[in-house]
Amino acid sequence: MSKVLTSRSEDYSQWYNDLVIKGELADYSAVRGCMVIKPYGFALWENMRDQLDKMFKATGHVNAYFPLFVPKSLFEAEEKNAEGFAKECAIVTHYRLKADPNNKGKLMVDPEAKLEEELVVRPTSEAIIWNTYKNWIQSYRDLPILVNQWANVVRWEMRTRLFLRTAEFLWQEGHTAHATKEEAIEETTKMLDVYAEFVEHYMAVPVVKGVKTESERFAGAEDTYCIEALMQDGKALQAGTSHFLGQNFAKAFEVQYLTKENKQEYVWATSWGVSTRLIGALIMAHSDDQGLILPPRIAPTQVVIVPIYKGEESKPVIDGKVKEITQSLSALGIRHKYDNSDQVRPGWKFAEYELKGIPVRIALGLRDLENNVVEIARRDTGEKTTVSIDNLANHISQLLEEIQQSIFEKALSFRNNNIRKVDTWDEFVQTLDEKAGFISAHWDGTSETEEKIKEKTKATIRCIPLNNTQEEGKCILTGNPSKQRVLFARAY
RNA sequence: CGGGGCGUAGCGUAGCCCGGUUAUCGCGCCUGGUUUGGGACCAGGAGGUCGCAAGUUCGAAUCUUGCCGCCCCGACCA
């Protein structure tokens, strides 16, 4: 069988879909906008999830789980949050089906089973969680609360794309409660740093840390911090957000605590999340026309071994040698797979594992064994080398590190080469159309201007980078004075 | 919701304009054999509500009407 991928230059969107489907990460499902995450895709998510979970725990957080359903009255308590999500909510109105008298063998919603109060399927959990925190918090001694949950959420998006925007998606959402504003802000930026560290160090995707403008802010937040990544087609992707929620939810849900001085104060809040969308970022940041390229630190399989048999009698010889190799790989904790399936030939396996993005392939036949060597192929560069079997595991271990670095460096230089400083409107429009990427430009700071730029060019302000250089300039659209450049891009 | 495209075997498709025996081809699948250093070959075989419904007709994958679903582009969004 040949699995031909659409090339990036031919049709970028189709290339992306082909990678997801033919790389067996996910499938379309019978439910509009919802996907099936297949075992290979889920193994990738598990590696990402497990690493993030470790990092959350290392920063003092614990996991909990809250209900999928949010009573409408709770959902609407924080007005801005409710308003922001209202347009994309799935709502449960009934709790029973019955046989349809007019349509044999079919079921209908039982009109007598209408719920007293509708339940919103969570698009995010602030409401149900803050309603709960109300019961957990009385005193400053109860603070901080540092809770994370791994969950699914539903947002009824008009247009969906595999991993990037599905109606149901998996994510984690951290929800913390603090005694002071300073502590909450510190938490917000700390978790942003955790995200940036994870995405860069493990996913090998460089990010820009920044703050969202008012119009791009999370509904109900005082400030939204974000990490923004650049995809190979020059479009930006929001890879994670961390929100400083101020006292908005505490006030909406009447969550107060007693200070040491016996005074009632509202609690300060944060929330932060990353989702399965990260998998989309990973795919679009690194992969090529041959398939996925996965960074070793999160690849489900880091090394695949393909035997080249020559006649029946070669099988036990090669299998025996491979057993030694796999033992030495296991000893170093390297995730590996030996594919000695007789169903397909080596060439087929080579192509298949390239499509799957396995970082390193080892091939060996009798010819190699005579010389005590194997052939090693790197997925990221396609480079093949012949190396000695002695000390192979150590060599592989180093190679995996090198690949991890190399993938990151490549993405980093692509990203850096695609941040362009622009000072005039004409140049801005031209750059967007010809080169895409991030554009660093002056903006007068108003939502009106931001909106006009979006209308005219489809470019949005991705973020105001943290620790941004302050410099005098003129807004590219209005010419009004500006104190700093912000990052624009067309985005997913 | 607007614009475009598509729905025929597990997947990809021909046939449709111009209605006519048994619906085309490739991949995959099953059986047997030969193979294995970049997506093997030979022989035999199985597999179909032609998206759904109604209509026109002696006869519908093909014509008409309605409906449903999916993908892409846009508005919306992590």
Image (cartoon, helix red, strand yellow):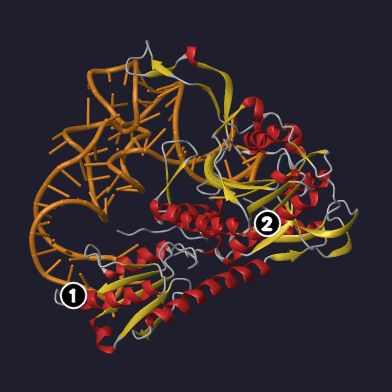
Q: What's the residue type where badge 1 is placed?
A: Pro
Labels 1 and 2 positioned on one and the same chain:
yes
**Could you tell whether A436 is left or right of A203 in the image?**
right
Which quarter shows the N terminus of chain A?
bottom left
Q: Secondary structure at mark 1?
A: helix
Question: From this viewpoint, is residue A225 visible?
Answer: yes
Image coordinates for residue A88, horizontal then vertical, percent = 61, 34
For marks 1 and 2, the one nearer the N-term is: 2
**Could you tell whether A321 is left or right of A81 in the image?**
left
Foreground: A54 or A117? A54
Position above or below: A270 against A40: above
Foreground: A141 or A162? A141
Image coordinates for residue A391, horizontal then vertical, percent = 38, 84
Q: Name the residue furthest bottom.
A: A371
State the residue position of label 1.
A316
Please give the label number shown on residue A192: 2
Quote the CA–CA distance across marks 1 and 2.
52 Å
Image coordinates for residue A55, horizontal then vertical, percent = 58, 59
Q: Secondary structure at mark 2?
A: helix
Q: What's the residue type where badge 2 is placed?
A: Leu
Please give the label number shown on residue A331: none
Image coordinates for residue A73, horizontal then vertical, percent = 66, 25
Residue lying at 69% horizontally and 39% vertically, measured from the top left: A137
Position above or below: A325 against A443: below
Question: From this viewpoint, is residue A11 visible?
Answer: no
Q: Chain of mark 1?
A: A
- Quarter assignment of residue A250: top right
Foreground: A445 or A451? A445
Foreground: B51 or B19? B51
Asked if the residue under mark 2 is in contact with the one under mark 1, i.e. CB atoms within 8 Å, the reply is no
Residue lying at 49% horizontally and 13% vertically, measured from the top left: A111
